[in-house]
Every structure is written in structure tokens, then in C-alpha cells.
Amino acid sequence: MKNKALKKLGVVLILLLLVTGCSSILATDNPTQQQGNDQTQDVKETNENKNASNSKEVADKVRIGVVDLAKIKTAHPQAKTLENLGEQIRDINIELQAQGDTLNLTRKNRQEHLKSIDKQIDKRLQDTKDKYQERIDTKVERTKEEISAYEDRIKEEMRDKLEKKQVKIKKQIKNKIEAKKEEQRKILKEYNKELHDKYYQDILNLRLKLQMLQSSSKEKKEYQKELVALEKKRKQELNDKKHELEKKLKEFISQQQKEANKKFKTYQQELTNQMNNKVMKRKKEANEELQSYVQKQQKLLKEEMQNKQANLSEKLQGTIVEAEKQLSSSIETKNKKLVDGLDELKNGQKSLQTEIMKDIKAEIAKVAKEKELDVVLIDYRNNIAAVDITDEVIIKLKN
């Protein structure tokens, strides 16, 4: 159920909801209680999935923080003590079960019960294996989440750099085009002046002839015809020059765009290679860290298995011998002590769970106040933009 909850996208549990059920968050030996917690978690997930569509709107209105509650609880100074209490409770429960079995021992079935020792030992050792495997699985999942988050940051960084590069290139192209247009305006202006100088005298002469009184009507028509033709020729040459410059400008713009595209693609490829190298390096480091962690856990498991196997074998065989000698009274007395001790451990476990959660809530509240956060969430997902304050909370817990 825990893995199922972690894998669901879009699930956001508000810390206030968590507080109301904090006594059931940590490990327990009661299967019925754990099943109830799983069912409660399913109900929470269902309700929060219904509200997921509203989470984005809320995030836009308030400052939101997020914490990795599992990571914080693991980092709490009393986390190891709580884990030890859980192990002691499990050991006593198993020992009580073993003691109950020994009440039925007789000399006739002693050999049969001696054979069952191996099964009892295997059961205890399997519990130990499961404990270490759970640690490794948790580490693997957390590593995957860290890598995924790192990849998301790299992608966002890459998008930002590409956008800035594109804006810069467009600005450069625009400046070059404006400079080219200004250059052509000057050329056209100079060319227009040349045309004016070229045709000025001829046009002036024709206009003067048109104004001469002694010119006949026929001559004036000829002069007018020549003047119109001359001005038309000058205008055509100017238009031809404009078209020539416009064509060159289009070619210039096209060439600049091609060069810009090539430049952008080159930058994009270089940036992609750079970012991919960063991701590959981080994955390699994470894998090395994970392998080191797994090897360490395997070493600890081997040592604990060897010690437990020897101790359990001696203890269980001694229990059978004791059962033969004191078949009822001594075992019942011992069971009473175990039960009393179990109750004391459970009370201590419950109190420590409450104390840990109280510490965590207090430190979360302090960090939230310092960072001016309105709401603090756990189990962050991509549909909410939030400030991760996990490390700050851990630092305060350790200080």
C-alpha cells in the first residue's frame, strides 16, 4: 500500500490532515491496525484525487512549502531508538509465540519440536532480511525520485537558455536588417541625386522651350512629348534601382535567417550534449552511492544473520529444555514478564512516536514562519509549485 501511495501522481496530502492521524504513521506490529491505516490512506488518496483539480488554483494564491516526511522522520535524532523499540516488540511477540508452543512439549515429542527450531529460526531470520530489503527498496525509490527531479531541473535550465539564445539571435538579425535598410536608403538617395543631375539640364531646356512664346503649337507638343518621355525614363530608372535594392534586401534577410538557424542549431546541440553529460554524471554518482549503500546493508545483514542464528538456536533449544523441566509454571511466569515488558515497550513506542511528530511539526512551523509560507504539504507532486524545506527542518531537528 505504501508503494502504491508513493507512485500515484498528483496526490498531495496537507500536513494538517497528517497531524490528525500521526499516531499511525510509524511502524507497528499490529496487522489489523496496519490494515486500517492502509484503508484510511486509500480514503485520503481518493478525497485528494477529487480535489487535485483545485490544487493548482490554491497554489497560485498562497505560498506553499513541501517536506519529505519520511526523510525527516528517518533523520530525527530519536529515529534509531524508535526502530530499536519496534525490533524489541517484534522479538517479544515472536518469543511469546514460541513460548506458547513450548507449553505443549512433552518428552515424547521433544525431537519433533527440536526439528521445528529451524523453522522458527528461519522465520526470525526472514524478518531480518525483510527489514534490510525494505531499507534498500526505500533507498532505490528515493534515488529514482532524486534523479527524476534533477532531470526536470536540467530540462528547465536548458529551455531557459535556449529561449534566451533565440531572443538574442533575433535581436542581432533585426539590428543587421535595420542597418542594411539604412544602407540601402542612403544608396537610393544618392542614386536619385545622380539621376537628377543626369537629367536636370535636358528637362530644364525642354521646360524653357515650352515657355518660349515664339514656339509653334506643333513644336510645343514635341517638346512636351520629349519632356514626358524623359521624366518617365528617369522615374523608371529610379524604380528599377528600388526593385534591385529590395531584391538584395530579401536575399540578405534570407541569408541572415539561414545563418541564424544554423547558429541556433549548433548552440542547441552543444547545450544538449552539455546537459546530457551533466545528467549522466549525476546518474553515475547516484548509482555509485546506491551500490555502496547496498553493499553496506548486505554486510550488516550478514553480520546480524550470523549473530541471530547462533543466539536463536541456543535460546530456542534452551527454551525446550526448560519446558521439559518446568512445563507450565516457569513458562507462564516468564510469559507474564514478557507481556509486561511488551506493554511497557508499546507505551514507550507510542510516546516516542508522539514526541517525534511533535518535534517535526514544531520545526516545520518554525521554518514555514521563517520563509513566510502559508501552507506546508507532504508528498510533493508535479502539479504543485512549492518550496522544499525538508533539509532546513532536518538541520533544526539535529541542532
Image (spheres, helix red, strand yellow):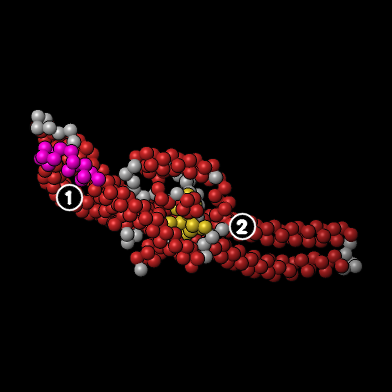
Question: Is 119 positioned to the left or the right of 174 in the image?
Answer: left
Q: Residue at x 37, y 39 (%)?
A: 32
Q: Which residues are magenta?
A: 320-336
Q: Earlier in the sequence, mark 1 or mark 2?
A: 2
Residue 74 lies, in percent from the top left, at: 33, 56
* Mark closer to the observer (1, 2): 1
Please state the total of marks drawn on the protein image: 2
> What secondary structure is found at the residue carrying circle 1?
helix
As drawn, which residue projects farthest toward the top?
A: 108
Residue 303 lies, in percent from the top left, at: 15, 51
Local crowd size for mark 1, using a 10 Å CA cut-off: few (<14), some (14–19), many (≥20): some
Q: Which residue is mark 2?
A: 246
Q: Which residue is mark 1?
A: 304
Q: Residue at x 90, y 67 (%)?
A: 214
Q: Which amino acid, mark 1?
A: Glu
Q: Residue at x 13, y 45 (%)?
A: 315
Q: Which amino acid, mark 2?
A: Glu
